[in-house]
Amino acid sequence: MLIQRLYSTLRPATHLAARTLRPTTRYISRRTMTSHIYSSTTAPQPASSTPPDPSGDSPSADTSKVSITSHNQYNSPHLIRSELSPDPLKQFKKWFQDALNPSDSSVPSVREPEAMAITSVSPSGIPSTRFVLLKTVDETGFVFFTNYDSRKSKELAGPNGDGGYASLAIYWKEVSRQIRVVGKVEKIKREESVEYFNTRPRGSQLGAWASPQSKNVEEGELEDRVKDVEKRFEGKEVECPEHWGGWRIVPL
């Protein structure tokens, strides 16, 4: 059930097992900690005035391992089941509004809470993850928009073209919360795509025509394509391309 997936996976990013819901709730003060990345497990050496060898052939270069030595403290309010909506989508909408405009002045707002990672799978079973922007959360699922000719769209369409499966992951660093969704993919209606497309800035509309996603382009080719599209729609509204539109992830 989605409610189990949604609630059991909202936890500090350092833990991958489901947390038991506590009977009380409280906020813990947040601490800022410095992150360090070292090329080995040894202590970092003083900075050298000699520029690094770009070839990587320097005898002192150690590229065998990169270690993260920081230990961040992730703090977030406890989840109380009795305070959660039985409808996970309604609960997400509430959390999203709180992320934008916290009701508690001691809780920071989340910058760009609509950013989410989506993972699709190729016909041979190879996963691929990239970030997209959430644009709609309705009574059915989570909607984002993209080029239908892109690699992700072809994988999201599934082997039969009627929609495969995908997973979403949303991470809100400011409040130490992550949300995971697994669901069936479906293409939204053309009318919905056109309606959203008409609200986009003109530059983004032109880009939808000019940018051949998941394809190689030569130096300067994209700029030339943009100029061609600008001439094509000069003095008139930009139409929504047939190859552009929305996908909806319907939670299982």
Image (cartoon, rainbow, N blue to C red):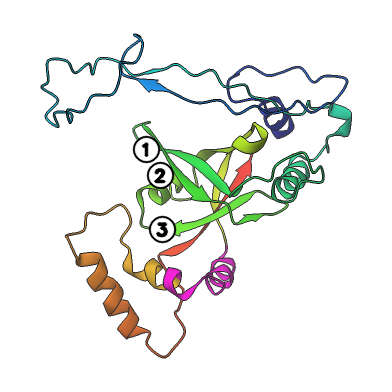
Quadrant of residue 73 within the rendered picture: top right
Q: Amino acid at mark 1?
A: Ser
On screen, 31 above or below 60? below
The N terminus lies in quadrant: top right
The numbered dot on residue 122 is 1
The numbered dot on residue 155 is 2
The C terminus lies in quadrant: top right
On screen, 111 above or below 55? below
Q: Are marks 2 and 3 in contact (CB under 8 Å)?
A: no
Q: Are marks 2 and 1 in contact (CB under 8 Å)?
A: yes
Q: Residue furthest front?
A: 49
Q: Which residues are magenta?
A: 189-204
Spatial separation of the CA atoms under disc 3 and disc 1: 15 Å
Q: Specify whether residue 48 is painted magenta.
A: no
Disc on the earlier residue, 2 or 1: 1
Disc on the earlier residue, 3 or 1: 1
The numbered dot on residue 148 is 3
Spatial separation of the CA atoms under disc 2 and disc 3: 10 Å
Horizontal side, residue 152 vs residue 219: left or right: right
Q: Nearer the viewer, residue 57 or 167?
A: 57
Numbered circles on residues, count: 3
